[in-house]
Image (cartoon, helix red, strand yellow):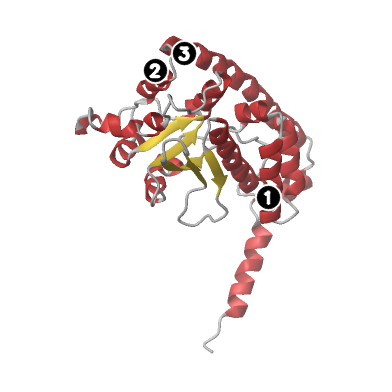
Amino acid sequence: MFSKLYSLIIEYAHDGFYNATDKLNKFISSTDGFADILWQIGTIPEEIPHDSTEEKLFAKASDAVLSRAFRELGLKSTVLSERADSADVIAQSDIYGYSLVADAKAFRLSRTAKNQKDFKVGALSGWRKEADYAVLCSPYFQYPRQQSQIYAQAVDNNVCLLSWEHLIFLLQNRIKENETLNLSTLWNFSDSVAHTTVVSEKKKCFIRKFDTQCTSIVGFEPNNLDAFLISCIERIRNRGNKEKAYWESERKIILSYSHEQAITELIKNKKIDEKIRQIDLYIRGISRD
């Protein structure tokens, strides 16, 4: 079903951004193949061009997937349409009365080293406004494994560092908030870390501690999640092979170019003509009036 979502992103890219977003939200909210989408939404397909409409739609689709995952966990959740200075997803608990804002992250497998700006932990905290909690959802194995400023920011601002894999684990085990299970213990995890962490260790990765908390509150042993994450690695390897196949096919196409084709493609890739046109437009528009 993820392949269907991908094809819809390509198809809707020419329908206008807001119209396309609305169609994708409806598809994600109603599809019976949600589990397959949830498994793969954390990885942006290599075929999608950087900074393209398709890439922006993929990001909005990931918001819709995160929102549905919250609903599957028993919360009310919606995707927000505004982008500036606002979280992408909101959720509320009817049982316990808390609310949260959330941001979904997806990365390419070819992406080089990421930094704190890629995760926007500090910004997400600012988007909390009247909500009780702030949750970042990123691919599990894309979080820094040793030290990072994002952990200090999460501790200082009480931002929950969740992963798509955590959500899959919970939903596969039919976890749902009810009168005896309050999931706010998860969303509030970074606050508990703040009370037990000295300043000099704030940047240390605490994902393993979160893993333990995640399994504990739903009545599982840590080794249950460990075994699940090992199975996730194999899935990522399989996805990686598919993404590598795309670049291998691209390599073959490029190697088949004539000298003239190669030059034309290089000029197109660097957007040289577009940049020249933009300079011309700017110069022609200069006036003291």
Q: Residue at x 23, y 31 (%)?
A: 195
Q: Is residue 201 left or right of residue 81?
A: left
Q: Point out the frontmost of discs 1 and 2.
A: 2
Give the mark toward the camera: 3 or 1: 1
Q: Is residue 261 left or right of residue 57?
A: right
Whole-number angstrom distance, CA of label 3 to CA of label 1: 37 Å
According to the image, label 3 marks what residue?
226
* Among the two numbered marks 1 and 2 on one chain, the one whose residue lies closer to the N terminus: 1
Nearer-N-terminus badge (2/3) = 2
Q: Residues within 10 Å of mark 1 (few under 14, many from 20)?
A: some
Left or right: 284, with 250 as reference point: left
Residue at 66% in and 39% down: 29
Q: Is residue 212 above or below residue 149?
A: above
- The three-letter code of the residue at mark 2 reads Ser
Q: Identify the residue under disc 1.
A: 22
Expressed as whole percent of the image width and height from the top left, the position of residue 136 reads 45, 38
Q: How many marks?
A: 3
Position of residue 1 measured from the top left corner of the image (x, y, whole percent): 72, 30
Q: Amino acid at mark 1?
A: Asp
Q: Is residue 247 left or right of residue 214?
A: right
At label 3, which amino acid type do we have? Asp
What number is the disc on residue 163? none
Residue 216 badge:
2
Q: Is residue 116 visible?
A: yes
SS at badge 1 = helix
Residue 237 quadrant? top right
